[in-house]
Amino acid sequence: MQFLSYLINGISLGSVYALIALGYTMVYGIAKMLNFAHGDVIMIGSYVIFFAFGSFGLNPILSIVLSMVVCTILGVTLERVAYRPLREAPSLAVLITAIGVSYLLQQVAQLLWTSSPKSFQSVVGLAPISLFNGELTISGETIVTIVACVVIMVGLIWFVNHTPAGHAMLAVSEDRGAAQLMGVNVNATISLTFAIGSALAAVAGALLCSSYPTLQPTTGAMPGIKAFVAAVFGGIGSIPGAFLGGILLGIIENLSKAYISTQLSDAIVFLVLIIVLLVKPTGLLGKKVNVKV
Amino acid sequence: MTKLKNLKKSTKSNLITFGIVILFYIVVQILSGADLLTSSFSGQLVPICAYVVLAVSLNLTVGILGELSLGHAGFMSVGAFAGTLVWVLLCETAPAWLALILAFVVGGIAAGLFGVVVGVPVLRLSGDYLAIVTLAFGEIVKNFMNACYLGYDSTGIHFSLKDSASMGLADDGVVLINGAMGITGVTKASNFTIGIVLVLITLIVVLNLIHSRAGRAITAIRDNEIAAQSIGIQITRYKLMAFITSAVFAGLAGVLYSLNFSTLVAKKFDYNTSILILVFVVLGGIGNIRGSVIAAAILTVLPELLRSMNDYRMLIYAIVLIVMMIFNQSPQMIAWRKRIAERFAARRAKGKHPTKEVG
């Protein structure tokens, strides 16, 4: 029973990773860049909810929507200001810029809201469910997180495969130049990708901080990096891959916390990344891309 | 004088770099002899040297090999722990100079071995994946050293990943690494002279590597891997060579840095430290070794001088990273700079030959 409880918590954590990983994987697939600042967008979104819901007592749904709007604007602005000028530049330059943006967001948050941790009030009002005569308790946060993740996942797959904007995304990720020749507005498509990824980050932030209620400027960094691990694990660029990778990573992390060592759980997660990249660099569901001269 | 003129351009440039380092050493020695140095500045001397070595070694990976490493602090940590362990064990029994040299050698080799371990994925990956693997490596090292307990007693060496009690040391046992508390009670051994010697050794090795046949092969791989492979350059060999050299020097810098303090904790060598070194490299100019030396030295001293700015320091670093990248690498910016330069050149030409304007 203990094991089942760890497993469910792992799936819940993994769902959050999956939501964050979706943002990574879509941006990576379409803009071909690793948006290091994605985790920090989550942090900013969580602060928005913290103030809107915790301090001003706004309706939880409204606070999440507000946070999504803020994150969307932030994500699109970052893309426009920092990443778009470097779209044709070497990937090293883009990567260093992304690290700079990530650092910038953390430092701004630290100056605005100090580095002292804030205790985040859960946005989920669902009572915990007790199963097997109280032997297994599942918190409301866990249920909402898992359900939200599955719903968003299905919605996103539908969006990409059945709408003109989604087709444009697929086209740009396949071949940017060819897509442009076919009349796809590449800039708008990339902006849309950043917008969707950042809005999902806001949702992920709300769910993450509801389950793990300490909020500080570095809150987003570690989950962000782990979500990238999840995206790589599942195969970068693949939406179901991000889901699968996120869930598996969450389970691995929680089980190693429970049975191996709390301190080493992060190290184990990263070890998974290195092993995956050594054995199957394209991830579980990724496509193999041949490099041509 | 004619001899100096006949030198190769690269040799001349290298001599200038060495000259700057030696000049810095002499100036500091004179100032400290005249008792003109503030205590906070003299406390910064060894860290300056360590950061210069780190920046130069990271520039080898980022600028010459063209791959981003975000785990440089991890190599530093490995070197620091290995070297400090050797120093703690030997400084009582062996002569100090021998123990110190052994500490540096062991620290460098340990970091180099980890360079091999991380270098294997390097061969299969590049770009973003490689960056994330090095980041993961740095985090693994930090987590592992934070949870690592090591000690010895009459029955042998004890090791645990839980806590110091579970090592099962006998009463006469000595704890060497105490988890997150790290190694304590280290006799300080680093000084400015050792630091400068290490900086010079690093510069000699790295600059010679860059201007050697191997260095040209490495830059060829950076510029176009497939083209380099097609003319018979062994990608694996040269990539590993650059990466391991970089790791070894990061380890040596770690030994230098840690022996400057009486305690050594793993959390000093975190992601932020790796980024800090990256800022040095970017600000000094990617691929420009002399730039790294100067940027590392200035950026280590500057925060001490501008204490009131301390809250904004990291913010400024972040902005520096973004602005430098956009200014140097964005195609529009490059075109814009070219236009400006042409305009200046045209104006200068006008000024020089005013007669041409007539007619």
Image (cartoon, coloured by chain):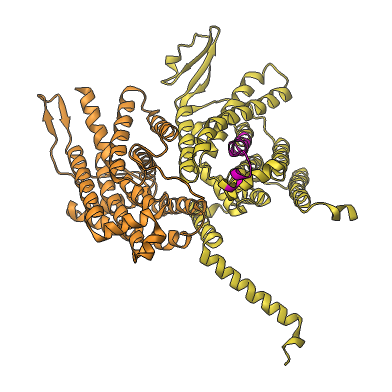
How many callouts does the rendering have?
Answer: 0
Does residue A97 appear left or right of residue A237 in this picture? right
Using the rendered image of the protein, determine whether residue A219 is visible from the camera's viewpoint. yes
Q: Residue furthest right?
A: B2
Residue A15 vertical placement versus B103 (above, below): below
Identified at 66% across, 29% down, the residue is B104
Q: Along the horizontal axis of the image, is A190 left or right of B70?
A: left
Q: In terms of depth relative to the viewer, which is nearer, B242 or B318? A: B242
Chain identity for the colour orange used in the image: A
State yes or no: residue B242 in magenta. Answer: yes
Does residue B343 lie above or below B128 as drawn? below
Q: Is residue A112 visible?
A: no
Q: Main secondary structure of the magenta part?
A: helix
Observer-nearest of A122 and B52: B52
* Residue at far left of view: A133
What's the residue at 43%, 21% (across, down)?
A: B161
Residue A100, placed above or below residue A126: below
Q: Colour of chain B?
A: yellow
Q: Which quadrant of the rendered structure holds the C terminus of chain B?
A: bottom right
Specify start and end residues of the magenta stretch as a single range: B227-249
Quick one: quadrant of the N terminus of chain B? bottom right
The residue depicted at 40 percent of the width and 63 percent of the height is A80
Between B126 and B268, the one nearer to me in the picture: B126
The x, y position of residue B272, in whole percent, is: 49, 43
